[in-house]
Every structure is written in C-alpha cells, then in structure tokens.
Image (spheres, rainbow, N blue to C red):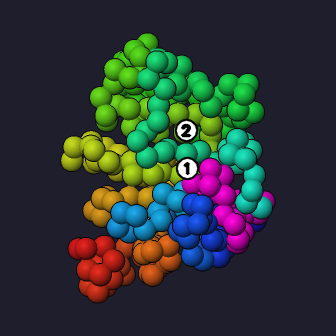
Amino acid sequence: MEKSDPLLTVQDIHTYYGDSYVLQGISLKVWQGQILALLGRNGMGKTTLIRSISGLTPPRRGMILFKEHPISGLPPYEIGQLGMSLVPQGRRIFPSLTVRENLLVPTSALTGRKAKGNNSAKSWGLETVLQEFPRLAERAHQFAGSLSGGEQQMLAIGRALMANPDLILMDEPSEGLSPVLVKQIEEIMRSIREQGHSILLVEQNFGLAMAVADDVYVITSGRIVYHGSPGELAGQAEILDRHLGI
C-alpha cells in the first residue's frame, strides 16, 4: 500500500438485518494516522457500519478494502489478523478473566496476530499498555468484572492496542462515562493517533468527536448526508439541527 492510498475504503455498501435495509449505499475513506468520526442520531446505522467493516454483519452489496485488500465477506478473525481492532459498544470485556488475562487475549495463539510492531512509533505489548494505562497496572490481577465503567473502557482500548492494529474501530467509547473520564478518553485517542494508528470513531458525544476528529461524516437513515472537517461542520446550522439535534 502506498502512503497516498487510503487505509480503509468503504465503497457503496448495502447492509441488511434480515429484510431490514439498514445501510443504503455508504462510502467513506480513512487515512493512516487519522481520526474519522461518524455522527448521527440513534438507530441511523452507525453501529451497523462498524459491524459491516469488522465482518460481524457483512454487506450484501458494495466493497470494503483494508490496506487495499478486499475484506467484504471475510470472517472477523481474518480481518483482525490483517491489522484491525474493535473497541465495541458496551466494552465487551471478559468479566471472569483478570485485567492481565483480558489484555493477553489478542496475542493468544487463537488470534494468529502476535504482539508485534506496525508502522506506528510504538510497539504495544503488556508492559507498554500497562504504562499507558496506570490504573490497569494497579488492577492487573483483579477480575475485569470488578472494574468501574471507566476502567473497563480503558481495558477495552488497551486490549485493542495489544494487537498493534493499523486501524481501531471505536463504537461509543464515551458511553456512560463522567465528563472527567470522557476528557481522559479524548487524550487517549489523541495519543493513539500520534503513535501512528488510525481510528474510526462512532460517537454520540458531539463535543468529544469534534475535539479529536480530523474528518467528520454524518449519517441519517443509512445514508451519508454530510462530509467535511469539524470546523466546516460547526458552521452548518441546518445539518446540526436536522440530523444531530444540536
């Protein structure tokens, strides 16, 4: 892949849940070292897009390229092995495993992707993740189910980093967190970008998305209705009111 090529290309995808037509021709691009934010009201298709990209709900039509490889129809584990990680909505940590055991899951023999460097400045392993998240280091031997919501979100992000991904899909990382913790998540995302990773961010928190994003898409009823920079979106009163309720 040349540096000028997008890391991720989503081209005219159409995704269904049974007979329900959810994504109706979505196209977008994510570049290396970029945070792209996808905004929209509840039920507009944001999480379905994440599921389509990660292979959990494959599109029926259209194309998804990751590092110029077609990934539509590949099982999620193969997509993960190519260098993509998911921080799912609701965290989805393993509550009966310790913090340390949760972090080691992406480097197990089953994943086929060991902790090794990519093009980023930092190669992530257990030691470096625990340095990045001191709260997790303090609780490394605690069961993950005993952590607070904010700590569980840090664990979900740390677990994604352990695979040394080129692209991290983040689905509502600020959900249910206090303003102080939301600010901490913002700082973590900035740090991840500085280290060379890309992030596709689905987020209801408009302020957080606008603070970290390089590029913004707005989705309504399974279609992209706006694409621009955060600064440009801030001046679009009709888009903010009609599609985001702001």
Q: Amino acid at mark 1?
A: Ile
From the viewer's perspective, tell me whether residue 68 is left or right of residue 227. right
Q: Amino acid at mark 2?
A: Leu
- Secondary structure under tag 2 reads helix
Q: Which residue is mark 2?
A: 161
Name the residue: 33% across, 48% down: 174
Question: Residue 147 occupies which quadrant of the picture?
Answer: top left
Question: Residue 152 occupies which quadrant of the picture?
Answer: top left
Name the residue: 45% across, 74% down: 221
* Residue range corresponding to the magenta coloring: 51-69
For residue 242, above or below residue 105: below
Q: Which residue is mark 1?
A: 168
Q: Position of residue 18 (x, y in %)?
A: 60, 61
From the viewer's perspective, tell me whether residue 15 is left or right of residue 81. left
Q: Position of residue 29 (x, y in %)?
A: 60, 70
- What is the distance, in whole Å, between disc 1 and disc 2 at their CAs? 8 Å
In this view, the residue in front, 164 or 22, is: 22
Lower position in the chain sequence, tag 1 or tag 2? 2
Q: Position of residue 159 (x, y in %)?
A: 52, 33
Dot 2, crowdedness within 10 Å: few (<14), some or many (≥20)? many
Q: Is residue 68 magenta?
A: yes
Q: Position of residue 116 (x, y in %)?
A: 69, 34
Dot 1, crowdedness within 10 Å: few (<14), some or many (≥20)? many
Name the residue: 48% across, 51% down: 170
For residue 77, above or below residue 137: below
Q: Is residue 154 magenta?
A: no
For residue 223, above or below residue 196: below
Name the residue: 27% across, 44% down: 176
Q: Is residue 9 visible?
A: no
Mark 1–mark 2 CB contact (< 8 Å): yes
